[in-house]
């Protein structure tokens, strides 16, 4: 059924990994998902009533299609379906199925009926499929409609749960994962590029709150548009939470000038990234975060060789650095970026970083890096950069 308003309820299913937790954790996670769906619906001003049962949420609303689409923006939701609700009486199921069929089977040649059942009923799931299928065939008597169980054009799905039943056609995919926040917080190095927003989102999907940090090297080494891209990416990410968030913007032009002036050109990127890590570590202390996240992918940039990643890691002592994209190809990252709404922001025109040398070092030497950092007093500069950073509301 494609007409808005034809359905009155939404079936929301939880991510499959939520379902394998111990029942205490599972209930806690499922209720958290419900809270986040509520927050999103309230932010959108939708009228609804929610009923949670172990393993499912049913949301009644006259705007079921909108609710179903919104629910797919909540972490911990695997899918949702706009549905027509009725009682578990066979006659009621038939009537509801006919209403749905009337709207969806017009002009179609093949269909199937599938039924899932929880609870005790005087019929089996197969009985439901046979009865509903037969009634539909009778209803469309004049048409050339046939049952095709292998490759139907339309599948009428029926979910019977105790004394209620739901008839639906479509299943919208949600992100899956775990509800946001159940894993605590991470500090994310967020550039306006394609990769880091995806890395952030993947961590959110697995239950981590994010505090994005952007290093602003404008106007000498990048431009204002790059900063706006980073802020807009953060906005797009927080859009997935139903509430705003905060991000840090660290002034970086001065530090990068020192690195450019005092260090061998080939070491610019390594020193630049290590500096970002150092500041991120201090922000993690402040924010009581559990780790640092970057959008690095093995070999994608000169600073992302195995050796250089090792040298980068040495800049952080108290937190793990998580790189959710380490094994991703660019096309895989781009596919997610499109899906989560950051691709069109990341690919906007901007100057990008113009501090990078033509031939950056591929196998940096840690001892040498430490020597340069001592000379330019990186630690002191990191303290100062943090003091000058701005925490902005998104
Ligand atoms: P991205 O697409 O995320 O910009 P990239 O492939 O262009 O990544 P780099 O520019 O080498 O790679 O950056 C590696 C990682 O360092 C980024 O994914 C991001 O986590 C972090 N990073 C880079 N530039 C910045 C910045 N200006 N502010 C905050 N973090 C940054
Ligand atoms: Mg980049």
Image (cartoon, rainbow, N blue to C red):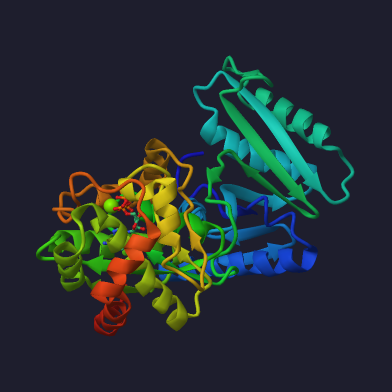
Residue 47 appears anywhere in the view: no
**Quarter of the figure with residue 234:** bottom left
Q: Position of residue 306 (x, y in %)?
A: 44, 47
Labels in figure, total: 0
Q: Position of residue 393 (x, y in %)?
A: 31, 77
In the displayed structure, 78 sits above or below 187; it is above
- The residue sitting at 21% across, 62% down in the picture is 263
Q: Position of residue 347 (x, y in %)?
A: 24, 47
- The residue sitting at 88% across, 50% down in the picture is 120
Foreground of the two, 356 or 8: 356
In the displayed structure, 127 sits above or below 264; it is above
- The residue sitting at 37% across, 55% down in the picture is 365
In the image, taking residue 39 as reference, residue 384 lies left or right, namely left
Residue closest to the far top: 144
Residue 155 appears anywhere in the view: yes
In the displayed structure, 121 sits above or below 169; it is below
**Quarter of the figure with residue 44:** bottom left
Foreground of the two, 109 or 94: 109
Q: Quadrant of the C terminus?
A: bottom left
- The residue sitting at 59% across, 33% down in the picture is 101
Q: Position of residue 258 (x, y in %)?
A: 17, 69
């Amino acid at each position: 059924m494609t007409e808005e308003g034809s359905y009155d309820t939404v079936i929301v299913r939880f991510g499959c990994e939520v379902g394998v937790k111990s029942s205490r954790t599972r209930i806690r996670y499922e209720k958290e998902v419900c809270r986040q769906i509520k927050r999103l619906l309230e932010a959108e001003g939708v009228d609804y009533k929610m009923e949670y049962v172990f393993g499912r949420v049913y949301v009644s609303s006259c705007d079921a299609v909108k609710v179903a689409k919104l629910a797919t923006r909540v972490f911990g939701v695997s899918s949702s379906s706009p549905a027509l609700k009725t009682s578990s009486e066979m006659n009621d199921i038939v009537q509801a199925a006919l209403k749905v069929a009337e709207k969806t089977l017009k002009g179609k040649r093949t269909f199937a009926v599938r039924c899932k059942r929880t609870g005790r009923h005087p019929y089996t799931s197969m009985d439901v499929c046979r009865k509903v299928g037969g009634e539909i065939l009778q209803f469309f008597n004049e048409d050339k409609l046939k049952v095709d169980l292998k490759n139907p054009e339309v599948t009428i799905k029926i979910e019977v749960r105790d004394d209620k039943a739901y008839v639906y056609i479509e299943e919208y995919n949600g992100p899956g994962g775990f509800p946001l926040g159940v894993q605590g917080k991470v500090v994310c190095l967020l550039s306006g590029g394609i990769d880091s927003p995806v890395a952030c989102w993947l961590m959110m999907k697995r239950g981590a709150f994010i505090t994005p940090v952007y290093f602003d090297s404008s106007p000498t080494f990048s431009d204002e548009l790059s900063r706006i891209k980073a802020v807009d990416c953060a906005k797009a990410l927080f859009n997935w939470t139903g509430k705003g968030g905060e991000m840090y913007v660290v002034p970086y032009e001065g530090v990068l000038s020192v690195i450019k002036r005092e260090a061998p050109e080939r070491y610019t990127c390594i020193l630049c990234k290590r500096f970002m890590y150092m500041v991120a570590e201090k922000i993690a202390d402040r924010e009581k975060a559990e780790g640092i996240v970057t959008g690095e992918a093995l070999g994608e940039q000169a600073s992302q060789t195995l050796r250089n990643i090792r040298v980068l890691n040495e800049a952080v002592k108290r937190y793990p650095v998580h790189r959710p994209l380490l094994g991703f190809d660019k096309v895989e990252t781009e596919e997610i970026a499109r899906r989560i709404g950051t691709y069109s922001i990341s690919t906007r025109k901007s100057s990008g970083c113009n501090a990078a040398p033509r031939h950056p070092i591929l196998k940096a030497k840690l001892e040498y890096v430490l020597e340069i950092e001592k000379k330019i007093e990186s630690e002191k500069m990191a303290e100062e950069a943090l003091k000058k950073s701005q925490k902005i509301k998104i």
